[in-house]
Amino acid sequence: MGIFKCLSALLVSAVLLLNLPPGLCGCYKRIFSFGDSIIDTGNFVHMSGNGSSRYKELPYGMTFFKNATGRICDGRVLVDFYAQAFQLPMIPPNLPEQDSGRFPNGANFAVAGATAMPPAYYRRWNHSVPMPHSLGVQIGWFKEMLQRLAPGDDDGAKIRQLLNESLIMLGEIGGNDYNFWFWFGDAAKPREQANQFIPDIVAYIGSSVQELIGLGARSILIPNNFPIGCVPSYLSMFFGSSNPADLDEHRCLRWFNDFSTRHNQALRGEVGRLKARNPGAKLIYADYYGAAMELVKHPGRFGIGNPLVACCGGGGPYHTGAACDRTAKVWGDPSGFANWDGVHMTEKAYQVIAQGVLNGTFADPPLLSC
Ligand SMILES: *[C@@H]1O[C@H](CO)[C@@H](O)[C@H](O)[C@H]1NC(C)=O
Ligand SMILES: *[C@@H]1O[C@H](CO)[C@@H](O)[C@H](O)[C@H]1NC(C)=O
Ligand SMILES: *[C@@H]1O[C@H](CO)[C@@H](O)[C@H](O)[C@H]1NC(C)=O
Ligand SMILES: *[C@@H]1O[C@H](CO)[C@@H](O)[C@H](O)[C@H]1NC(C)=O
Ligand SMILES: *[C@@H]1O[C@H](CO)[C@@H](O)[C@H](O)[C@H]1NC(C)=O
């Protein structure tokens, strides 16, 4: 009943994410999220302690918060829009309040730079990834938090009850596993070799989903990976030699989008198997790739100019001539751009993607169908 009202509000209201009547969409009491810089809301910056980080300063945060918050964006990120749609306050990062927080509305375990696979996985390819806080570490933090929130829960019943009322966002995760290989590659690291990671990464995500279901999770959102061939940093790194045949009809890098598509097909298959094995769980496959491609194919529909250039950065065809930091050039109102800093998207882009996931255009089933 609530959900039908929710969906009809969605159909009639263009600004639905900002002004749904309270209580309409209270499907979940909490959100617990895992991932990387796409949804980190402060863990990475917290870990950097007193050290300097460009993510601690404007123009990061300029749009909505008017201050840097630890989000790697000009404003809100996907988890913020989902929380708003479910009438929840913004979900805090876990690390700043790790030992004392009650986290009544959930916690965000995502850390910028995180990979899906544990760093040790890459040793066999003589490759190293820079961040230790991979998906397994984040799930470890989550299990410690659950023990703290439900002490003396010998049979796990309290935790199952708590998770029964919660939405889990598992990712996007895995993007960095590929990024680090492609970005720091050399002749010894041919890009084709990353194809060998796909089955392992997808299986790891799948076993993480199964582990969370075992703890009592019932509703899990599993997003796929973005079209990396349309990301300004990829375009500037890999279209340097300018072979026009490398680009597709949208002027994105064909090879890299085909690569993301292979990962996504494998992930979709895995989610299908998980659904069959767990009929009592609601597993939602979210097509971030498809939603992001709408911004590339029809930028004008969303008030976006060139979808392949960064809003904040430097010169060059993709505005990636300098890193986005407090001295960088901001090329205009971020709401007119899909990409924020050469790698991450703008609040505007995340809002469009979140709508497509909530209303079901880019999610199976729609996230709002409680
Ligand atoms: C960070 O700075 C504060 C205030 O200057 C200081 O009290 C604290 O010890 C510093 N922390 C670290 C880890 O250096
Ligand atoms: C902006 O954020 C910084 C920390 O990131 C904080 O020290 C400062 O007080 C904030 N400023 C405002 C106006 O909220
Ligand atoms: C691993 O990488 C290092 C540093 O690039 C190189 O010196 C070494 O030969 C590589 N080893 C193998 C087995 O490829
Ligand atoms: C989870 O919630 C549903 C409905 O909200 C209820 O039917 C079910 O029994 C609950 N399961 C557990 C394990 O609490
Ligand atoms: C769902 O969201 C997408 C993406 O923002 C939008 O293009 C579409 O019009 C929405 N559909 C409905 C039925 O609201």
Image (cartoon, rainbow, N blue to C red):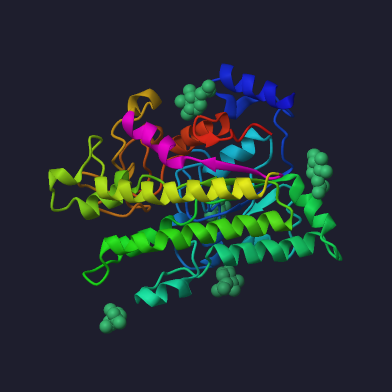
Quarter of the image for the C terminus: give it. top right
Residue 234 picture location, percent across and down: 28, 52
Q: Is residue 21 left or right of residue 268?
A: right
Residue at the (73%, 26%) spot, across then down: 2
Residue 283 picture location, percent across and down: 61, 44
Can I make out residue 112 in this image?
Answer: no
Observer-nearest of 367 and 283: 283
Can I make out residue 200 in this image?
Answer: yes
Q: Does the magenta-highlighted stretch encompass residue 282?
A: yes
Residue 233 picture location, percent across and down: 29, 51
Q: Can you tell which quarter of the image residue 21 is in?
A: top right
Residue 295 picture location, percent across and down: 37, 33
Quarter of the image for the N terminus: give it. top right
Compared with 116, 281 (above or below) is: above
Residue at the (75%, 60%) spot, across then down: 146
How many numbered badges does the structure rendering display?
0
| Magenta segment | 280-297
